[in-house]
Every structure is written in C-alpha cells, then in structure tokens.
Image (spheres, rainbow, N blue to C red):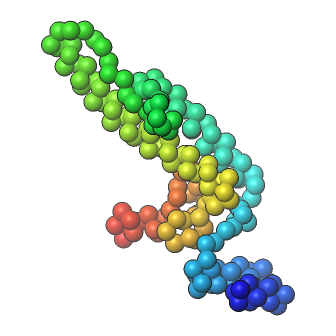
Amino acid sequence: MRHICLFIIALFECGFKRLVFLYFFLAILYNIPIQFKHILMDTNTIAKIKTQLLEEEKRLTQELGQFADRSTHNTDDFNAKFPQFGDKYDENASEVATYNDELGLEHTLEKELRDVKDALKNIEDEKYGICKYCHKPIDEKRLLARPTSSACISCKKQLTQEI
C-alpha cells in the first residue's frame, strides 16, 4: 500500500520520465511484477508484429501437418507419421532414416510454434516486449527482427555465455 501512495505522490510532483523511473524502482524494490500495457511500443508496431506472428503460426502448423498428425490428447503436440515405403530391407532402412529426420524436424518446428504462441499470448496479456529475466524492455529492433524474442540481448548473451 505504501508503494502505491508514493507512486501517486510522484505523479503530481514530477514529469513522466521520472515517474517511469520511480515505477521501475518501486517495482524492483517491492518485487512487484511490472505491467507496461504497451507504453513502450506504439500500437502500429505491435499490430505489425502480431500479424507476423500469426502468419508464422499458420506456416509452422501447415509445415508440421505435411508429415505429422496432431496429438489426440494435446492439440499443441504433433506426432510424426512413420512412412511406408515397402517391405524390403533397403525400404525399411529408408523408412527409419526418414522418420528419424522428420522426428527431429517435428521437435524443432514444435518449439518454434510454442515460441510464437507464447509471444501472441504475451501480446494479449500486454506483457510483450519485456525481458523475462531482467524485466526491462527488449529493443524494438530486436523484436522486429525476431518477434518471438523473450529476452533482451544482454540477458541472452549471459545465458549463452557470450560475454
């Protein structure tokens, strides 16, 4: 309750930049989840990114549908179909090799699809563009280049140990 009072007092006493700084400070101090409601990006940029994500979701679903079926238990899960080339040994070996390749591709595409759905959910929840590790805004250029980004560049570098 005290942090809300301080926030309201600050609203009357200082400008917008100081208010945003104070908001961040209080949120970090009291471990409050930060909610931006897209104040950091304009609605046109969000709409453009959302359109990109929806197109990517459609493409990934279609690509997965070419060699995998949706799971009956979990609609977000796909199961690669085992190919049927014939009954001869070399045909069986080709079936196994093809299935193995498609299984790896299935896992990769499912992960990409999961990232796209997470980004779309973050847009709907008005949490899009915020790093999930440091809770700071992700650079708009990064989001335009890779709309599924959930971490800022500095946190991603730390995670991949590029520093």
Q: Is residue 113 left or right of residue 42?
A: left
Q: Residue at x 63, y 72 (%)?
A: 34
Question: Residue 24: x and y, percent?
Answer: 64, 79
Relative to 109, residue 145 above or below? below
Residues 83 and 44: in front is 83
Rendered-image quadrant of the N terminus = bottom right
Relative to 27, residue 38 above or below? above
Relative to 29, residue 58 above or below? above
Rendered-image quadrant of the C terminus = bottom left
Question: Residue 66: x and y, percent?
Answer: 45, 23
Q: Is residue 57 left or right of residue 49?
A: left
Q: Residue at x 74, y 58 (%)?
A: 42
In the orientation shown, which residue stands out farthest toward the left?
89
In the orientation shown, which residue stands out farthest toward the front?
73
Q: Residue at x 84, y 87 (%)?
A: 12
Q: Quadrant of residue 103?
A: top left
Relative to 68, residue 27 above or below? below
